[in-house]
Image: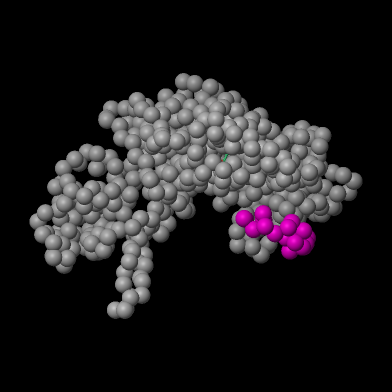
């Protein structure tokens, strides 16, 4: 097994807030930002950092610009010389970094004890991955992972008086929420994560992020929020060893607990967005299971299914994150995980985003999609908010005649892909797939008739007129809109394929 570089793990005491902010400014001034780092390293995406060996990348930033030095030190985890650091930053800041333990010296050679990852306009400190292989693996603080990005992209970013980031880790969600929140509470049960989050708030000069240590909602009992975001330790397994991943609760209990408790902490109209994994048992409908978590919550609920994996694939994926070197250990754990699933009747695991909106006065609705969605880019939060509006409209408009009397428009991002098959009479269309190019992408097959109908939805014609036009072309009675088609159109509105021009 690869050894940790610092087996004794001297305590990581971050610099005071003022010094951290000063250091953040120095990093920004040297160009320590996403685009400039990618350019310096000659890569297009930070994912390349996992694929290309650090020495290969380090050779591309051998120069003596401060930016080169910081990339080697804080991103590639390479050692640098003491006098190189002296040249790059004021002596007082260098002294602070060394005395706080952010940089450790061994003779003339210096190494960073954490990583600094730029994300948009911010910089986030977090643990290097090899802490997962050390004796201190349990308190590992993760960086900006795929799950972090999914939640970031899906977050509803409207003004919030008070935002809670439950399970803040390095504080990435809290730092991003600070731009549209008066106050942000970054909460974590791991004291090391709380310290990382506080340091990152200061590093990015954010005075409106407070940190709090404790489990789930206990430290914020009695508090209400306009927005709660949570990327919790949702992994479903028999393990308890990694705090960033294992909640220490059975199966999907941690997600259920957050879903059940969050409504008590939302202002009226406030949103809670939780990334979840849930178990799918033999003979049980996963949607009913999630609906039961939300029953009586006083919230409208949108579940966005992102992926479904069979239990074997799920176990192999997660065990592979931590057991990289030893096949035997991997095998033992794999057996334990599968036994755990078998004992509980778990056949597969679903993952997705649950968005809840507190709406106490009205009859609440619950929606969940069957086809997995893909979250693409930062517009997704706005798409989710629009979906809430669309569902509110449909819930309030039971009469299809009213819906078909309105001039809906095909949304900008809608695309239709056509599959053609060769036949003796030339190319024959065999399938049409409707999808969104960006935002939240769910693909689904639609009929040639629906393709024609959508062509007529131009924001001026009513849906009834668009139907009549397509019906005349297809030789169908334009006066009777069949129930299945009315249902299909309601769903197209719900998914955002069709919107009212003002929306
Ligand atoms: C998957 S990480 C998410 C980190 C970060 N929010 C992000 O989006 O990248 C889950 C976080 O939840 C924290 N956590 C675990 N159990 C918790 C609990 N009972 N209460 C609060 N936080 C907890 C972990 O320490 C970890 O920082």
Tell me which segment is drawn in magenta: 46-66
Q: Residue at x 45, y 51 (%)?
A: 374
- Residue 405's x, y, as percent? 15, 51
Q: Quadrant of ligand 1?
A: top right
Q: Residue at x 19, y 40 (%)?
A: 398
Q: In the drawing, does residue 223 fall left or right of residue 72?
A: left
Q: In the drawing, does residue 431 fall left or right of residue 79?
A: left
Compare residues 124 and 275 and report the one nearer the observer. 275
Quadrant in the rendering for residue 169: top right
Q: Residue at x 70, y 51 (%)?
A: 75
Q: In the drawing, does residue 12 fall left or right of residue 292?
A: right
Q: Residue furthest right?
A: 107
Q: Is residue 257 visible?
A: yes
Q: Is residue 207 visible?
A: no
Compare residues 443 and 94 and report the one nearer the observer. 443
- Residue 382's x, y, as percent? 39, 47
User: Is 385 situated above or below 56?
Assistant: above
Q: Residue at x 65, y 45 (%)?
A: 320
Q: How is the image coloured?
A: one colour
User: Is 19 situated above or below 343?
Assistant: below
Quadrant in the rendering for residue 196: top right
Quadrant in the rendering for residue 269: top left
The prevailing secondary structure element of the residues shown in magenta is: helix
- Residue 341's x, y, as percent? 55, 34
- Residue 502's x, y, as percent? 26, 52
């Amino acid at each position: 097994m690869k050894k940790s570089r610092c087996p004794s793990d001297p305590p990581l005491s971050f610099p005071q807030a003022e010094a951290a902010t000063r250091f953040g400014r120095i990093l920004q001034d040297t160009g320590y930002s996403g685009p400039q780092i990618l350019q310096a390293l000659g890569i297009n995406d930070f994912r390349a950092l996992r694929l290309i060996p650090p020495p290969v990348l380090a050779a591309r930033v051998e120069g003596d610009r401060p930016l080169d030095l910081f990339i080697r030190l804080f991103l590639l985890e390479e050692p640098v010389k003491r006098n190189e650091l002296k040249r790059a930053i004021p002596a007082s800041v260098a002294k602070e970094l060394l005395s706080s333990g952010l940089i450790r010296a061994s003779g003339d050679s210096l190494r960073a004890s954490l990583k600094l990852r730029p994300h948009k306009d911010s910089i986030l400190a977090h643990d290097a991955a090899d802490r997962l292989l050390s004796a201190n693996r349990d308190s590992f603080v993760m960086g900006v992972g795929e799950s972090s990005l999914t939640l970031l992209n899906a977050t509803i970013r409207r003004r919030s008086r008070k935002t809670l980031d439950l399970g803040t880790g390095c504080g990435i969600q809290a730092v991003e929420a600070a731009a549209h929140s008066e106050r942000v509470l970054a909460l974590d049960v791991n004291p090391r994560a709380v310290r990382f989050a506080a340091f990152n708030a200061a590093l990015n000069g954010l005075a409106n992020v407070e940190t709090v240590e404790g489990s789930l909602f206990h430290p914020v009992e009695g508090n209400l929020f306009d927005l709660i975001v949570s990327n919790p330790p949702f992994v479903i397994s028999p393990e308890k060893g990694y705090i960033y991943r294992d909640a220490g609760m059975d199966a999907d209990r941690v997600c259920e607990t957050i879903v059940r408790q969050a409504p008590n902490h939302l202002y009226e109209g406030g949103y809670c967005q939780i990334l979840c994994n849930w178990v799918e048992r033999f003979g049980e409908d996963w949607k009913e299971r999630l609906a039961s978590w939300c029953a009586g919550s006083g919230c409208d609920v949108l579940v966005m299914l992102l992926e479904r994996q069979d239990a074997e694939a799920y176990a192999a994926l997660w065990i592979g994150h931590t057991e990289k070197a030893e096949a035997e250990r991997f095998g033992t754990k794999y057996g334990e995980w599968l036994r755990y699933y078998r004992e509980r009747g778990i056949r597969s695991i679903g993952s997705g985003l649950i968005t809840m909106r507190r709406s106490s006065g009205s009859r609440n609705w619950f929606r969940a999609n069957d086809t997995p969605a893909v979250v693409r880019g930062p517009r997704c939060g706005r798409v989710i908010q629009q979906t809430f509006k669309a569902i509110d409209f449909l819930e309030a408009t039971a009469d299809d005649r009213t819906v078909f009397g309105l001039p809906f428009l095909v949304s900008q991002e809608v695309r239709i892909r056509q599959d053609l098959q060769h036949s003796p009479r030339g190319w024959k269309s065999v399938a049409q797939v409707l999808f969104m190019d960006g935002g939240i992408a769910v693909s689904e097959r639609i009929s040639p008739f629906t393709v024609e109908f959508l062509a007529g939805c131009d924001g001026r014609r009513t849906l009834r007129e668009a139907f009549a036009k397509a019906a005349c072309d297809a030789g169908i009675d334009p006066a009777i809109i069949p129930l299945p088609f009315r249902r299909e159109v309601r769903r197209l509105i719900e998914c955002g394929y069709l919107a009212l021009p003002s929306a």
